[in-house]
Image (cartoon, helix red, strand yellow):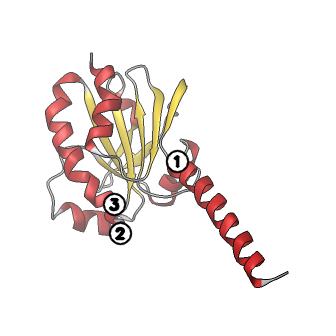
């Protein structure tokens, strides 16, 4: 086969792979809500928390890491939305795919107004169980007041898209 033919085939494969990979990173809207499983994780102080502590609230559960720039970029928007909508039943929950020490150091640099749980390796498995098929961060799920996952988002979750997702639930 001529080099030109190989280049064309490689380009088509790369284009197809890119389109497929983009589909994996696109947000997935749930048409059939799925139940949020029960889980327990510690906070940075080592205190265990069960996800049911926030039952009855609209939960935005964000998997992140201290070494992930897009994750850190999302946090100020999450802080603002938590402050703005807490009285309407919105609850952000951060699950760090990290060890306690780096998370503690990061939390000393920023005032986060929502719970941060330490997930570590358990958090990676939990994120996968909740629909993170590429095991990447950031990854976010939105859970309605009935405890059902209604939205999954891989990659950075903009404030505008979060509002579009949660506003119908706040009514």
Numbered label attached to residue 67: 2
Residue density around tag 2, few if under 14, some if 14–19, many if 20 or more, within 10 Å: few
Q: Residue at x 36, y 25 (%)?
A: 55
Give the class, few, some or many, for how many residues have Cα within 10 Å of label 3's Cα (few <14, many ≥20): some
Upstream in the sequence, badge 1 or badge 3? 3
| Left or right, 155 with reference to 110 | right
Say the numbered circle drawn on residue 70.
3
* Front residue of this view, candidates 51 and 86: 86
Q: Quadrant of residue 169?
A: top left
Q: If the image is split into quadrants, where does the N terminus sit? A: bottom right
**Could you give the CA–CA distance between mark 1 and mark 2, rounded to whole angstroms?**
19 Å
- Tell me which label, 1 or 2, sits earlier in the chain: 2
Where is mark 1, residue-wise? 126
Give 3 or 150, whichever is nearer the viewer.
3
Quarter location, residue 168: top left
Instruction: Please give the name of the residue rendered at 40% of the width and 30% of the height, measured from the top-left corner.
Output: 52
- Work out how far the residue at label 1 is from the one at label 3, CA to CA, in angstroms: 20 Å
The answer to whether mark 1 and mark 2 are in CB contact below 8 A is no
Q: Which mark is residue 26?
A: none
Contact? badges 3 and 2 (CB < 8 Å): no
As drawn, is 160 to the left or to the right of 110?
A: right
Q: Farthest right residue? A: 1
Tag in front: 1 or 3 = 3
Under tag 2, what secondary structure? loop
Q: Residue 32 at x, y = what percent?
A: 56, 23
């Amino acid at each position: 086969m001529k080099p030109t033919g190989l280049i064309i085939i490689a380009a088509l494969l790369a284009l197809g792979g890119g389109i497929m990979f983009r589909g994996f990173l696109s947000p997935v809207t749930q048409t059939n809500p799925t139940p949020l499983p029960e889980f327990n994780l510690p906070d940075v102080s080592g205190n265990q928390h069960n996800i049911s502590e926030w039952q009855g609230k609209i939960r935005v559960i964000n998997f992140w890491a201290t070494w992930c720039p897009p994750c850190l970029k999302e946090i100020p928007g999450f802080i603002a939305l938590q402050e703005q909508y807490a009285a309407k039943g919105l609850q952000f929950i951060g699950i760090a795919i990290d060890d306690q020490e780096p998370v503690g150091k990061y939390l000393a640099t920023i005032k986060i107004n929502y719970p941060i749980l330490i997930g570590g390796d358990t958090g990676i498995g939990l994120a996968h169980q909740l629909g993170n098929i590429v095991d990447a961060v950031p990854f976010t799920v939105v859970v309605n007041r009935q405890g059902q996952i209604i939205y999954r988002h891989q990659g950075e979750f903009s404030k505008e898209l979060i509002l579009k997702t949660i506003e119908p639930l706040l009514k």
